[in-house]
Amino acid sequence: MKKLVLFLAMLLTAMTVKAEDPAINFVDGLTDKILAEVVTAQKTQDEKERLFHDAFTEAVDLKGVGQFVLGTAWKKSSEEERNGFLNAFTDLTVKTWADRFNMYTGQQIVFQGTRNAERGQIYVDSVIQDKQPVEVIWRLRPSKESYKIVDIVVEGVSMASTYRNDYRAFLQQNGNSVQALTDELARKSREFKSENKNN
Amino acid sequence: MGKKKFVLFFCLFVLLSGCATRPTDPEELKIYEEINDPLEPMNRGIHAFNQVADKAILKPVAKGYRAAVPAFYRGWVNNFFDNLSQPVHLLNALLQGQFKDAGATLGRFVTNTTFGFFGLFDVASEMGIRNPGNDFGQTLAKWGWDGDGGPFLMLPILGPSSIRDGIGTGVDAVAHPLGWALWNEQELHYGLVGLDGVSTRERAMDLLDDLEKTSTDYYATLRTMSRQNRRKKINEVLNKQEPDEKPDYEADFSDIEWED
């Protein structure tokens, strides 16, 4: 009997530890919050975009992502150029995602576990349940209070690597000018807006 | 244009567009090898052609199809063609020794052909049967031609591929049951292949629109995304599961400075 109680106690602790994995909780809480308060909320599209913008800039390690996607161009650019790029990048990314909010039809995200990566980073494995399930891996790094997202990998495609490849090709053809890239992203954002208004 | 003329034209095109120049700087060379696209000038030419053909014909047709046919019936079309390609997937799963995939593929084909009324309804997915979709590019990888399968290749109309996966696509197309079943009905055969193409283009519309609207170099974006996704598919059949190994999708953040 004593053994059984002990076993049950151990099992319970194991279960609670699993349910309270802080990295999973971070992603779970974040996606829950964005789905409830932004994506499915009764708000205007402009309001949703603003709220998503705030959530995005808080959850994503933009400076880290910026360093990675610009590579050597980041090292050679001024503080002003970097901030200009990050603003334009955030603007366009937020617009792209916000434009697809109405496609959400209640799909659930199931978390499968975590894996450690170098320098204290963590991969959170998840699957979006749909007719054809979609594998999504969240790459986090620890921050002061909790975590920051540094990459999202969808069906094997890393967003960070994709942006890096895209921007590297653009920079190569435009004299490695971060300003030219920023202008191009800003132009894309403006076009995105006007095109959607026409629809 | 006859077949012979086309081949001649194609060879001329490759010769005239030439190859990308191999850089000498070690850092640049590393990037060049990682991108692995020595045929870039030719590939970009094909990409430009694809863009023109897409804007003039494929996309307008796919848009018309979306406007004219309700989503429910478009689902039928998609399910029907997906089901018809399962025998080829089954053959590949067996050639790869992926018996679990073969089981799922066979189960899904039998279920959807019978209960799914000749494949119009995807009952198998509702029952939780996977759709692994093994292809001949993966088979070649399993037989030893692993990695990215040679340099990047942009195929006319079909889009991003590699030397290995381009061959794979050709072999899978030849093995497709539709071509054999309609051997004496070539017009119907081509009609159905066309419908499958329109259906495929329609389903890719939102993703491709987004990519074109938001990327600064559409070609480079297609190249990296297709290759990364392909690595995942290849690794699935190679059963590479070494815990210490860096995953393929792991971007190298080793010299990134974190704040706070």
Image: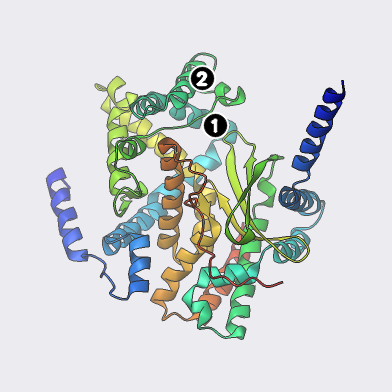
Q: Is residue B61 visible?
A: yes
Q: Position of residue B56 (x, y in %)?
A: 39, 54
Q: Is residue A108 above or below residue B111?
A: below
- Extreme residue toward the front, this view: A2
Q: Position of residue B154 (x, y in %)?
A: 32, 53
Q: Is residue A160 above or below residue B188?
A: below
Question: Which quadrant holds residue B92?
Answer: top left
The answer to whether residue B2 is left or right of residue B179 is: left
Q: Is residue A78 above or below residue B102?
A: below
In the rendering, which numbered label is found on residue B112?
2
**Which residue is at 47% across, 76% downward?**
A72
Callout 2: chain? B
Task: Please name whichever residue, A63 or A32, is drawn nearer the observer in this view of the structure.
Answer: A63
Q: Is residue B213 visible?
A: no
N-terminal of the pair, mark 1 or mark 2, is 1
Callout 1: chain? B
Task: Please name whichever residue, B108 or B96, is drawn nearer the observer in this view of the structure.
Answer: B96
Q: Which residue is mark 1?
A: B75
Mark 2 burial class by Cα count in 10 Å: few <14, some 14-19, many 20+: many
Kind of residue at disc 1: Gly
Q: Tags 1 and 2 in contact by the CB under 8 Å rule?
A: no
Q: Position of residue B116 (x, y in %)?
A: 54, 18
Where disc 1 sits, the SS reads: helix
Q: Is residue B239 above or below residue B216?
A: above
Label 1 – label 2 distance at C-alpha? 13 Å
**Which residue is at 61% across, 84% downward?**
A79
The answer to whether residue A6 is left or right of residue B226 is: right
Task: Please name whichever residue, A149 or A188, is drawn nearer the observer in this view of the structure.
Answer: A149
Kind of residue at disc 2: Asn
Q: The N terminus of chain A lies in which quarter of the figure?
A: top right
